[in-house]
Image (cartoon, grey):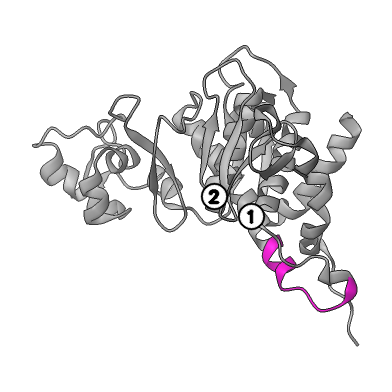
C-alpha cells in the first residue's frame, strides 16, 4: 500500500512540481507561484509615512475584519495601511487579530478577490497564521495544476487516443483532487492527537492526518477550483467529507477514499458503485504530463 501511494504521489507531483513547490524541510516550503490576495496581504506593507505599525496592524486581519474596507479598497495594501493610520486607530478598529464569534464570516478563498465564507460552514481546524499561508499555497498550486490539466484534456486533438480525454467534468476534478489528498495522507500518519491532525497543514506538510484534516485539505483545493463546499459532520467523531455542488448537482468529495460523486455520500445512503474514483479518471489528466512529439 505504501509503495502504491508513493507512486501515486510521484505521478501527482510530476504535474504539480513544474509550478515550483520545493520542500526544504517537513515544516517549511518555498513558493514561487503568483500570490493570490490572501497570501499577498499576509506579506503586505505595515508602514505608512515612515511609521511601522506592525506591532498593532496586520493587513490581512484588517481586511477580513471589515466589509466596508473590502468594498472600498479591495486588497490594496497601501490603501489599507493608510486607512488604518489615518482613520482606523482613531475609530478603534481592530487590526491585530480576527474578530467575531463562530457565526461570522472570516475564512478567505478565491483568486482575483477574496470571498468571505461563513465560519460555521468552514473552519481551518486550528491552523496558525503561518500554517494556513503554507497550506493555502500548496492547495492553490494543486488546483492550478488540475485546471491546467483539465484545460489541456478538454482541448486535446481529434485522435482516437486524445478524444477520450475531453469533457472533463467538475466532479472529476473533485475526484482527482481527492486522489491527491489521499496520496498526501498515505505518506503521513493517521492520528487523532496533537494540534495539526485536523488541519490541511497536517496533511500537506506536517505528516499527520485524520478524516477532518483530509476534508479541510480537499476543501482548500476546492476553494481555488471555484467549487462550493460544506464540511460535512464538522467537529464530530463521525466520518467527514466535502459536500459539494458540481455540474449543477449536489455531490460529495472524500479525500480519505479518493473519490467523488453526484448525490449523497455512500455513508448517507448513496450508491458506492456510482462513485467517481481517482483511479478511474486519472487518465483524463495525464495529458498535462505528456511530452510533445518531435517534429521534423
Question: Quadrant of the image for the N terminus?
Answer: top right
Image position, residue 174 (x, y; %): 66, 47
Residue at point 75% right, 33% down?
257
SS for dot 1: helix
- In the figure, is residue 30 to the left or right of 57? right
Q: Is residue 61 magenta?
A: no
Residue at point 41% right, 29% down?
120
**Residues in magenta, as a range:** 149-160
Callouts 1 and 2 close, C-beta under 8 Å: yes
Q: Is residue 48 visible?
A: no
Image position, residue 19 (x, y; %): 66, 55
Image position, residue 142 (x, y; %): 64, 49
Q: Residues within 10 Å of mark 1 (few under 14, many from 20)?
A: many
From the image, tell me which residue sits under label 2: 227
Query: Toward which corner of the image does residue 33 lie, by quadrant?
Result: bottom right
Front-most of residues 136 and 45? 136
Residue at point 70% right, 52% down?
172
Q: Is residue 153 magenta?
A: yes
Q: How far apart in space, not on screen, are marks 1 and 2 (Cα)?
A: 8 Å
- In the figure, is residue 285 to the left or right of 60? right
Q: Residues within 10 Å of mark 2 (few under 14, many from 20)?
A: some
From the image, tell me which residue sits under label 1: 170
Relative to 260, say whether 3 is above or below. Answer: above
Amino acid at each position: 500500500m505504501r509503495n502504491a501511494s508513493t507512486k501515486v504521489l510521484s505521478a501527482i507531483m510530476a504535474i504539480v512540481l513544474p509550478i515550483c513547490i520545493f520542500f526544504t524541510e517537513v515544516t517549511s516550503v518555498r513558493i514561487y507561484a503568483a500570490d493570490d490576495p490572501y497570501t499577498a496581504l499576509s506579506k503586505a506593507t505595515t508602514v505608512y509615512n515612515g511609521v511601522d505599525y506592525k506591532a498593532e496592524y496586520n493587513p490581512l486581519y484588517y481586511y477580513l475584519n471589515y466589509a466596508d474596507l473590502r468594498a472600498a479598497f479591495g486588497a490594496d495594501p497601501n490603501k489599507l495601511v493608510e486607512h488604518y493610520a489615518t482613520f482606523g486607530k482613531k475609530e478603534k478598529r481592530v487590526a491585530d487579530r480576527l474578530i467575531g464569534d463562530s457565526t461570522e464570516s472570516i475564512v478567505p478563498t478565491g483568486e482575483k478577490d477574496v470571498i468571505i465564507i461563513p465560519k460555521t460552514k468552514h473552519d481551518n481546524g486550528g491552523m496558525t497564521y503561518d500554517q494556513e499561508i503554507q497550506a493555502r499555497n500548496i492547495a492553490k498550486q494543486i488546483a492550478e495544476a488540475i485546471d491546467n490539466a483539465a484545460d489541456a484534456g478538454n482541448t486535446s486533438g481529434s485522435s482516437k487516443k486524445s478524444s477520450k480525454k475531453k469533457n472533463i467534468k467538475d466532479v472529476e476534478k473533485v475526484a482527482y483532487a481527492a486522489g491527491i489528498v489521499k496520496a498526501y495522507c498515505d505518506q503521513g500518519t493517521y492520528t487523532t492527537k496533537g494540534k495539526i491532525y485536523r488541519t490541511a497543514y497536517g496533511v500537506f506538510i506536517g505528516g499527520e492526518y485524520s478524516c477532518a484534516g483530509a476534508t479541510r485539505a480537499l476543501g482548500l483545493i476546492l476553494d481555488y477550483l471555484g467549487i462550493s463546499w460544506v464540511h460535512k459532520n464538522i467537529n464530530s467523531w463521525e466520518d467527514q467529507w466535502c459536500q459539494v455542488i458540481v455540474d449543477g448537482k449536489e455531490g460529495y468529495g472524500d479525500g480519505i477514499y479518493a473519490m467523488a460523486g453526484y448525490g449523497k455520500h455512500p455513508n448517507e445512503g448513496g450508491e458506492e458503485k456510482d462513485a467517481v474514483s481517482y483511479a478511474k479518471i486519472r487518465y483524463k489528466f495525464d495529458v498535462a504530463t505528456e511530452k510533445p512529439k518531435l517534429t521534423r
